[in-house]
Amino acid sequence: ATMFSSSSVYSLIKSVGRYHVHKENPFPLLRKTIAHNDTFIISMISSSKFNRNNTKRSPFSTDTISTDEKLSLPCQFISDISATLPHVQISTNKYDFFSHGKGESYHPTAPPAAVLTPTNNQDIMNILKLCNQHHVPVIPYGAGTSVEGHISALQNGSISLDMNEFKFIDDSSSLDDPCIKVGAGVTRLELNDRLRHTGMQFMVDPGADASIVGMVACGASGTTAVKYGTMCENILSLECVLPDGTFAKCGTKALKSSAGYDLVSLLTGSEGTLGVITHITVKLHPIPDHVTAAVCTFDNLHDAAEAVAMMRMCAVPVERCELLDESSVLAFQNYVSSSSHQNENKKAMDIKPTL
């Protein structure tokens, strides 16, 4: 539910363009729930997954901790956004709320009060200035694949800043350098698909098709970290908008730099709390000519960890490496042995620590 003054509701919904507005019924998909002193709350048509009474639901993605009070926004903020940035999409759709209020973590959904979709740096600068003016919390949103729970809108009247319109990929230089500049909305698989003809790839792989800027914000890593490192070692420069609306460029393409503060490393892993990252320049690596896979089991976790340490000390070119303990192996076994995933050609794994 989002609170607006009655004088601005009709013009707001018409400007948003999410709903077909009829003069005789200006709220076809909305209903008035509370009226008091020329101000009322507009809420979506209720559903089993959007319950203001917080009845017991599934502990997974349909769970929510939202309340009507938490989803309120200053009326003047909405008016200023619509007047200053008429081209910016503002969504109050409940499905957008749920998709932007939860990542891949176990935390319950905490939806924002609105979802804004900027298209350029200037949009973000103006939005953050207005958010500062009206004290509106901002949560940058990439692909929603993180597990930390930091995209949950826990504070009153938060907005989600959807960065998916930033699809810029700078491949005009024909990769004269082993690096490339990308926008905040580009995902890992989208970038590697664009690079197929070059023989180079972006190698940090957290498992999900995360947005690359989101990977910077979360300090992502993955099974390739054993050779290529984490996001901290694979980012050269970035562009961001600071909380007060100031635009900043940090870092260069140079591999070596000792000029001033290392602001790139400061913003990497900040989870959207220090600024909204809009573009980054990342390192690329050659695709290996040949890859050989192996599965090794050990009697205990200590022996498995020692084996990895010895391989690194002996300069064995390990491309990826992942450790599974007994509980993880057992979970995989149960999954594979289920009726929908049975495969006679699959050999059962030993319930032991496995590399």
Image (cartoon, rainbow, N blue to C red):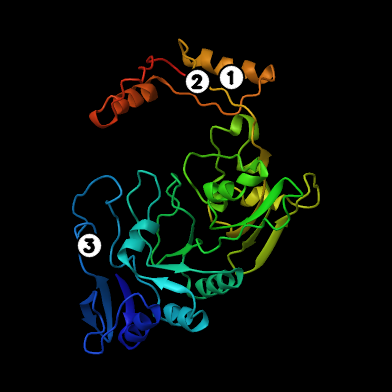
The residue carrying pointer 2 sits among few (fewer than 14), some (14 to 19) or many (20 or more) residues within 10 Å by Cα, namely some
- Where does the image place residue 34, in percent across and percent down from the top left? 21, 77
Q: Residue at x 33, y 53 (%)?
A: 109
Q: Residue at x 44, y 23 (%)?
A: 324
Is 279 left or right of 293, judged from the image as shown? right
> What is the CA distance from the residue labelled 3 to the residue labelled 2?
47 Å
Q: Looking at the image, is 55 positioned above or below residue 137?
A: above
Identified by mark 2, the residue type is: Leu
Task: Say which mark, if any, is on residue 355.
Answer: 2
Disc 3 is placed on an element classified as loop
Q: Relative to the observer, which residue lies in front, 209 or 247?
A: 209
Task: Say which mark, if any, is on residue 52.
Answer: 3
Identified by mark 3, the residue type is: Arg
Q: Residue at x 75, y 51 (%)?
A: 253
Which circle, 3 or 2, is nearer the viewer?
Answer: 2
Q: Earlier in the sequence, mark 1 or mark 2?
A: 1
